Amino acid sequence: MSEVQSQEKDYFWAYIIIGVLVFAATMFTVKTMGGSDYNRAAELIEENPSNSAYKN
């Protein structure tokens, strides 16, 4: 019985590493994707502050 257990490989740490890499890649992709979405709106607000939804 102990011979059967010693032959089986434990992939626990491999699964953890793969999970962390997938999570990091997803976070990096989301962070870099949304950066330029609001550039035009920011330019218009700088030009005329009354274009902002937040009125002072």
Image (cartoon, helix red, strand yellow):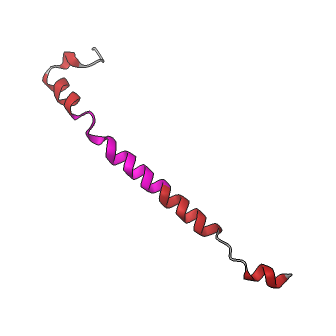
Which segment did they paint magenta?
Answer: 23-39
The tally of labels here is: 0
Compared with 4, 53 (above or below) is above
| Residue 54: % across, % down | 30, 18
Residue in view at x 33 percent, y 45 percent: 33
Horizontal relation, residue 44 to residue 25: left or right: left
Residue in view at x 61 percent, y 68 percent: 13
Report which quarter residue 19 is drawn in. bottom right
- Residue furthest to the right in view is 1
Residue in view at x 53 percent, y 63 percent: 18
| Residue 28: % across, % down | 39, 52
Looking at the rendered image, the quarter that the C terminus falls into is top left
Looking at the rendered image, the quarter that the N terminus falls into is bottom right
Compared with 1, 52 (above or below) is above
Q: Nearer the viewer, residue 16 or 46?
A: 16
Most common secondary structure along the magenta stretch: helix
Compared with 7, 14 (above or below) is above
